Amino acid sequence: MLLFLLHLACQPATPERIPGELARTGETLETVNGEPVTRGMLDAMLSAMPADVRTQIEEQGQIGQLQEQLVTQELLYQEALRLNLHKEADVQVILTFAEREALVEAMLRRIADEQTTDEAMLAWYESHKVQFRRDEVKLRQIVVDTEADANAVVEAAKAGSDFAELAKSKSVDPATAEKGGEVGWVPRSQMPPDLKAALDSAGKGAVVGPIAAMGKQIVLQVEDAREVVPFEDVKDQIKPQVQQELVRAWVAELQDANANAGASVEAPVPGAAAAAPTEGAQ
């Protein structure tokens, strides 16, 4: 026993774990109280964010703002350590639950990424297709001041002139003229009755008009028509919902496999803040 105690006494002390420490690698961006705030720390902060947020920050040139946020965080972090807040029992409980939540969040994100395949999203789309039924027409337009100008546009378009080029040179509507008259997909249900009536019998490529509207004359070209929004157009839109349902199903399977534990857990949505315990939860 004495030898064992002597052995323990000779062991080096375990260094104190400081919560929130980051490796200060890479180029020094700024210095706070003698401590460098580095490129590696900024990269780590960015990598911890969801992919869509990272993309938004990079595309909108907000890296500088993120760096300012990191510097301010470093200043406050140093002050918290100086006050030894990390050694207080109640703060340690908060830190422990923050770690648990981070681990759960990381796991759910991984499950969501692994299970949200194109095949899974397509299957969800097909089973919810009624939600994407739209009676829509894809249009280009040319807006002119007089009926005579409109008739000239109709004649030129029907004679084979490129409608988009006509829009660029003839249309007085600046919002669509520079885009070759492109309007995009328009639901028939949102059209004025006279416009809807004019388009009801118009097939793909048809030139319709002139139609009087708000003191102008409009000539339209039907580019396409559809009754259902295709999967590729809504793929990004439905992804969060598909992820949520897949994660909930995965958690339900995990609960079933551990039914003897007697726990009932509501599956959180990846990226969402932790919900308050439900009434009656233990």
Image (tube, rainbow, N blue to C red):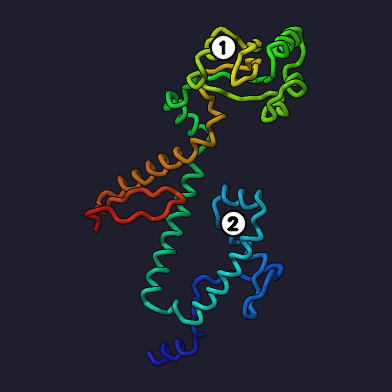
Residue in view at x 63 percent, y 15 percent: 222
The disc labelled 2 sits on which kind of residue?
Ser
Q: Quadrant of the N terminus?
A: bottom left
Label 1 crowd (10 A; few <14 / some 14-19 / many >=20): many
In front: 230, or 258? 230
Whether residue 102 sits left or right of residue 145 in the image: it is left
Residue 83 position (above or below residue 179):
below
Element at label 2: helix
Residue 53: assigned label: none
Task: Locate residue 274, reporting x and y percent.
Answer: 39, 55
Number of numbered discs overlaid on the protein picture: 2
Residue 199: assigned label: 1
Report which residue position mark 2 lands on: 47
Tell me the CA gap for discs 2 and 1. Answer: 50 Å
Mark nearer the viewer, 2 or 1 = 1
Element at label 1: helix
